[in-house]
Image (cartoon, helix red, strand yellow):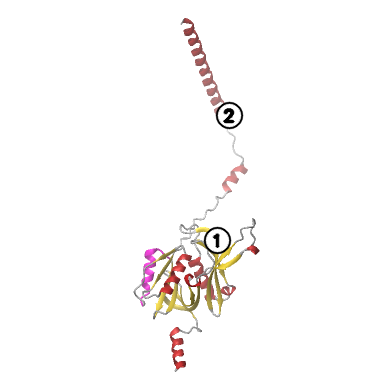
């Protein structure tokens, strides 16, 4: 027992002196560090740090939303067309049917409640004529179209297919840049059909193309799927192909107004003939 006690005392004394030595080294290092004179930074480094500009981070976030609604009395074909367009626009908000046909200013109030700066309003007259209003709320402009040559996805049954909610590539005809009223329509089509980046309902893929073509004074809209061959590792543009998906429609512009659903007329299509006048001529020719 005496041997164990002596060994314990020796070991404890060794540990105690070791800790004292470590404390002495740490205090000596601190003293030497404090005693050293501080070296000033060179002037070139100071100028460099002062002139450095922080990277510009853009806080812009595209919060574009499209309100889509129709008047009461819309037919089933036009309702199917509206549903097809809603499926192409993931950042859209559908609203119930509107009862009034005269006071279109109510649509601006609904868009303000829904926080939608863009509007697509389907207006049906006599249960056979479809008009589409494309407007920017609340200050405008707005465009009124007469829609013809309508083919919904259920009618065509084309072989093309793409992901729902994927972002489209918008392809505009070169004629859109030739005339001012077409430039206004191009900008409004871009606001309505271009899906915002990182939208919570969209998918980060570009697998279809929306084509806008000007022919005979009208705008023809088509939707195509981008088909990529699976057997090739490296995909080239020449190997891709387009397959039509649908829907199809033709927009005949009637007027462009300065404000939303009214105001001064910026553009008027002089070649436009209303469907009522066409039906009246057909009746007269039969007599």
Magenta-span inclusion, residue 63:
no
What label sits on residue 121 in the rendered view? none
Q: Residues within 10 Å of mark 2 (few under 14, many from 20)?
A: few
Q: Secondary structure at mark 1?
A: strand
Q: Horizontal and vertical percent for residue 4? A: 48, 8
Could you tell me which residue is drawn at 55 percent across and 61 percent down?
206
Q: Horizontal and vertical percent for residue 42? A: 62, 40
Left or right of residue 278, residue 105 in this image:
left
Between 117 and 85, the one lying in front of the other is: 85
Q: Horizontal and vertical percent for residue 75? A: 40, 75
Magenta-span inclusion, residue 108:
yes
Residue bearing the label numbered 1: 206
Left or right of residue 238, residue 206 in this image:
left
Per the picture, the main secondary structure of the magenta-coloured stretch is helix
Between 157 and 210, the one lying in front of the other is: 157
Residue segment shown in magenta: 102-116
Real-space CA distance between mark 2 and mark 1, rounded to the nearest whole angstrom: 63 Å
What label sits on residue 36 in the rendered view? 2
Q: Nearer the viewer, mark 2 or mark 1?
A: 1
């Amino acid at each position: 027992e005496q041997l164990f006690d002596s060994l314990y005392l020796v070991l404890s004394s060794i540990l105690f002196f070791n800790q004292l030595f470590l404390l002495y080294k740490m205090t000596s290092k601190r003293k030497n560090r404090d005693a050293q004179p501080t070296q000033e930074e060179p002037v070139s480094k100071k100028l460099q740090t002062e002139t450095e500009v922080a990277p510009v981070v853009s806080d812009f976030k595209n919060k574009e939303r499209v309100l889509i609604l129709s008047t009461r009395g819309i037919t089933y074909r036009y309702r199917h067309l509206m549903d097809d367009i809603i499926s192409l626009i993931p950042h859209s908000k559908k609203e119930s049917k509107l009862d009034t046909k005269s006071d279109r200013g109510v649509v601006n109030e609904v868009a303000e409640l829904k926080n939608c700066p863009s509007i697509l309003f389907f207006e049906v007259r006599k249960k056979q004529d479809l008009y589409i209003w494309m407007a920017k709320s609340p200050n405008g402009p707005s465009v009124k179209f007469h829609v013809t040559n309508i083919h919904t996805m259920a009618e065509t049954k084309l072989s093309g297919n793409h992901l729902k909610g994927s972002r489209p590539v918008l392809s505009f005809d070169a004629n859109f840049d030739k005339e001012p009223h077409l430039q206004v329509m191009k900008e409004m089509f871009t606001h309505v059909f271009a899906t915002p980046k990182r939208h919570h309902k969209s998918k980060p893929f570009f697998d279809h193309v929306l084509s806008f073509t000007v022919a005979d004074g009208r705008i023809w809209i088509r939707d195509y799927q981008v088909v990529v061959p699976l057997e090739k590792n490296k995909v080239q543009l020449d190997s891709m192909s387009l397959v039509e998906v649908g829907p199809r429609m033709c927009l005949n512009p009637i007027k462009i107004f300065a404000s939303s659903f009214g105001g001064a007329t910026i553009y008027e299509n002089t070649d436009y003939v209303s469907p009522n006048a066409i039906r009246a001529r057909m009746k007269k020719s039969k007599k």
